[in-house]
Image (cartoon, helix red, strand yellow):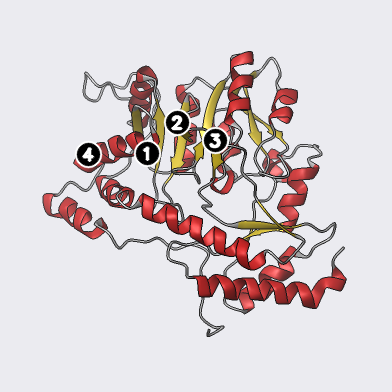
Amino acid sequence: MDQKELIPIAIPNLEGNELKYVTDCIKTSWISSKGGYITKFEENFSSYCGTNHGVAVSNGTVALHLALTALGIGPGDEVIVPSLTFIASANSVSYCGAKPVFVDVDIHTWNMNPEEIEKAISPNTKAIMPVHLYGNPCDMKSIKEIADKYKLFIIEDAAEAHGAIFGNKKVGTFSDISCFSFFGNKVITTGEGGMCLTNDLELDKKMRVLRDHGMSKERKYWHEVLGFNYRMTNLQAAVGVAQLERIDEFLESKKQIAEWYRKYLSTLTNVRFQRQYLGAESIWWMTSIMFDYLYFDRDKLISYLHENGIDARPVFSLIHEMPHHKKESIMPIAKKISRNSLSLPSFVGLTEDKVRFICEKISLFLDKNKTGFS
């Protein structure tokens, strides 16, 4: 293949009814935050995940903030969050004036370690925020048992895990409120967008009021509480409805891509993939690998792949090491994963030939540089 051809890490697949539904919005003039596609998307996505209610919002970060606010999380409260995740998980807690308390992760799944959760609980702890990292479900059985024991809320950050399964249920159904993202690189996209799911009717009503400037549902322009403009547009929802029609196709492609990576990297003894808990089914939103060396120059490999037209990315940096969340904590497992891991092209429609090419380049790099690793 031509080495100058870019293999992106993620691109949206918009080959279904997206244009048809968006055109319908434009022709009917329903382009803002009211319209039939918003209700349809909320109902269809919540039904797909297995919850009673869905509240569509403008992005995944505000979904987390809305969920925390609806649950009454505020100053003086603590929320347990994994340090190995995207910054939005912790930032949303800080937006509420609460304190994110970071915990280490499991070496195999890369998700928050339930044993570390229980150690981090204090009298100020109000909630646990499990993150299904890269589409791989957390141990929700253990997390739910801890939450019930200490009477804590659960807010699932399922931004990357549309359709992932733990036990016989989809993620997003184990919590008081779960939050999804529909950013352009997610399994299904609305460009920007998000959704909160819940089975609690009162929480659903509360989030709808908060989402719309705190405006009363009975009295127009009467604002009962301090709210936000977190609404999704009908245009975005129209794209979401079309995307959801093809989610099974998208998930099957993601699964196949992950299987190809495992196949072509299987001979490399120091390459590790995320593992799934027993009874869990990852959607492999982003196939990510860890190099099991004490010392490994991950960034050098990323540069090498970029030179060969492959858009690899580092996995997330640890939040507790960032300036505005700085904590003097030792998290050896999260540190190793963050330092030695990267995400590979995983977009829907990626071919086996391209996966093989990517794996050949990784193998060649390791062979050329093996004396530099330990």
Are dots 2 and 1 in contact, CB under 8 Å? yes
Q: Identify the residue position indicated by label 1 in the image.
A: 57
The kind of residue tagged 4 is Lys
Q: Position of residue 332 (x, y in %)?
A: 80, 43
Q: Identify the residue position indicated by label 2 in the image.
A: 66
Name the quadrant containing residue 149.
Answer: top right
Label whose residue precedes the other's in the sequence (4 or 1): 4
Residue 92 got which mark?
3
Label whose residue precedes the other's in the sequence (2 or 1): 1
Are dots 3 and 1 in contact, CB under 8 Å? no
Q: Identify the residue position indicated by label 4 in the image.
A: 34
Q: Is residue 364 above or below residue 35?
A: below
Name the quadrant containing residue 269.
Answer: bottom right
Name the quadrant containing residue 231.
Answer: top left
Q: Position of residue 329 (x, y in %)?
A: 80, 37
The kind of residue tagged 2 is Leu
Are dots 4 and 2 in contact, CB under 8 Å? no
Q: Position of residue 126 (x, y in %)?
A: 60, 20
On screen, residue 46 versus residue 340, left or right, reads left
Task: For marks 4 and 1, give the CA distance.
Answer: 12 Å
Badge 4: how crowded within 10 Å, few (<14), some, or many (20+)? some
Q: Decide if residue 190 is in sight here.
A: no
Task: For marks 2 and 3, give the CA distance.
Answer: 9 Å
Q: Nearer the viewer, residue 334 or 318?
A: 334
Task: For marks 3 and 4, give the CA distance.
Answer: 26 Å
On screen, residue 180 versus residue 26, left or right, reads right
| Secondary element type, mark 4 | loop
Are dots 3 and 4 in contact, CB under 8 Å? no
